[in-house]
Image: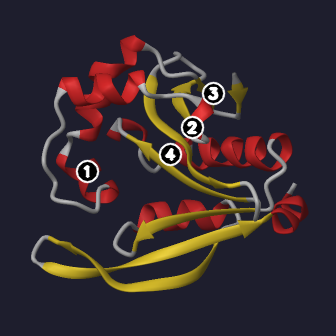
Amino acid sequence: MYTGKKIRLREYREEDIELALSYINDAEVKKLLMPGVPYPLTLEDEYKWFQNISAFHDTYNFAIETLEDEKYIGGCGINRLDWKNKVATVGIFIGDKDYWGKGYGTDAMKVLMKFIFEQMNINKIKLHVYAFNERAIKSYKKCGFTVEGVLRQELYRDGKYHDEYVMGILRDEYKKMT
């Protein structure tokens, strides 16, 4: 549907559900994404999520697949939209660890940003990331995001508290990069 250099953002399909569940239940992936207690989701939970995907709820979810072999490797999308103030809150994950650190997430985020700024007329994109997720922070900075704030000791994980960063990019900053 929307294509980058390495990936395509497309609709989620029913055949993605079991793989999505294995990705989201992976302990390392869950550690990087979920603020709550890292409890495993069920197949029924994943089916309910899939059945509720709809742009009518002002959320937009995309599956990320590789261009080379059309493999589903993760997902991204808009989790919250503030139409009045033109702010989109996004999230992304690469669930297949074979694709970590190889530019797939960065490419997916750039494609998502293009969709948001050029198709939706949004002025700002923001996201939240845990301070220990250095790989993601590096990727977001490559995409033009800057740290706008720090939520101190926002997350309790593995026996200690961690900061959470709020990062953002404005349309004008995006335009200067393209």
Q: Position of residue 22 (x, y in %)?
A: 23, 31
Give residue 8's mark: 3
Q: Name the residue under label 4.
A: 102
Q: Name the residue under label 2.
A: 57
Callouts 1 and 2 close, C-beta under 8 Å:
no
Type of residue at label 4?
Answer: Lys
Q: Which of marks 4 and 1 is in front?
A: 1
Q: Mark 1 points at which residue?
A: 30
Q: Is mark 3 on a helix, strand or loop?
A: strand
Q: Which of marks 2 and 4 is in front?
A: 2
Q: Is residue 72 left or right of residue 6?
A: left
Lower position in the chain sequence, tag 1 or tag 2: 1
Q: Position of residue 90 (x, y in %)?
A: 56, 53
Q: Which of marks 3 and 1 is in front?
A: 1
Type of residue at label 1?
Answer: Lys
Q: In which quarter of the image is the C terminus?
A: bottom right
Instruction: Say which residue appears at 33% left-offset and 40% top-offset.
Output: 97
